[in-house]
Amino acid sequence: MQLAVAFASARGASLTLLHVGDPGQGLRVSAVLPALDEEATIGKIVRAIRTRLVERFPLADELVVMDSDSGDRTREIAREEGATVRVHQRVLAAHGSYRGKGEAMWKSLCVTRGDLVVWCDTDITSFHPKSIYGIVGPLLLRPELQFVKAFYRRPPRVGGGTRATGGGRVTELTARPLLNLFFPELPGIVQPLSGGQGGRRALPEQLPFFSACGVETGLLVDTLQRAGLGAMAQVDMKQRLHRNQDLYALSKQAFEIPQVAMKRVGDARGERLWEDANATMKLIRPGDGGGLHLDVHDVVSVERPPMAAIPEYRARRD
């Protein structure tokens, strides 16, 4: 079997078409799906990976749904479709638990065994197995690569259809300006907040993970600082449809990105910029009777230590 994979280096936008001959190369692949209340989409995604990349083409050795204690049928549907399901709050319980996608990703390292670990979003309504093999391909073909990121066009839904542009608002209004300001090597990353990403386990197990929406920014910056730009690549996944979030939810997500940037800038200068900053976000909403209402939220993304430093993980890997 051969897999055709198009990918672009983080150094530029030129695409390279590669053909994977032996898909395994003796390396185990773990496909991880972080999920929270995704009963509408999780079944189709798990089924596509299982039938195409586990049964038909033996690329993925593990298919794990890392659930964040969903209140709907996400776990039940995922099990029915053949995935291994873990609840992240019950993994490494002695180390506590925080709510957030980054927490699920961090703990997934402890329950998987793959040499290559790929994470994929579970709110995708237009899922294709290339979301997995597109990340794996460059890692198999280019031994110098340690981390691969997906990018795609994300047309927002408007009424009953979609609009060609306008998706990725947090990326363009928050993440990209901050990367340009403080990490000028990274603005060439097309979708820095993309949830499609993966790498050789030897890298992410040595990186800290932010517990919530800042996880993607943290992984990019930490990978750059630890492995360098030459160890990073990005893959063009064409177009993807996600569930759209309202502006209030996006505002809280956007509030976490500067926290991560401030933390890393402060680390480089030996200063506590993030810890000394305000972590309370005040959102103004329309109230009853045409007035305004002030909502106050504590928005803090906890930094988890590298998984390689956790005794239970080291014992499991020995």
Image (cartoon, grey):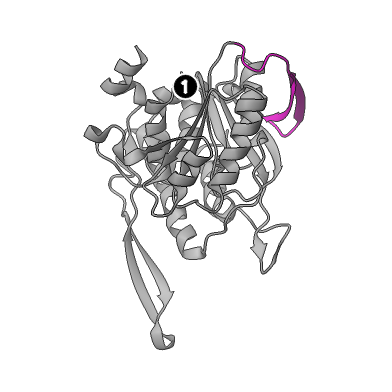
Quick check: 21 above or below 285?
A: above
Count neighbours of disc 1 (C-alpha within 10 A) and say few if under 14, some if 14 to 19, many if 20 or more.
some
The residue sitting at the left extreme is: 94
Quick check: 267 above or below 178?
A: above
Residue 147: image location, x then y, percent: 55, 26
Tell whether position 23 is magenta. yes
Quick check: 160 above or below 272?
A: below
Residue 271: image location, x then y, percent: 31, 37
Q: Is residue 261 visible?
A: no
Tell whether position 9 is magenta. yes
In magenta, the rendered stretch is 1-25
The residue lying at 50 percent from left, 18 percent from top is 115
Quick check: 275 above or below 2?
A: below
Task: Say which amino acid is labelled 1.
Answer: Leu
Which element is circle 1 on? loop
Camera-nearest residue between 116 and 59? 59
What residue does disc 1 label?
A: 203
> Which picture quadrant has residue 205?
top left
Q: Quadrant of the C terminus?
A: top left
> Which picture quadrant has residue 21?
top right
Residue 146: image location, x then y, percent: 55, 21
Camera-nearest residue between 77 and 103? 77
Camera-nearest residue between 170 and 119? 119
Q: Is residue 212 visible?
A: yes
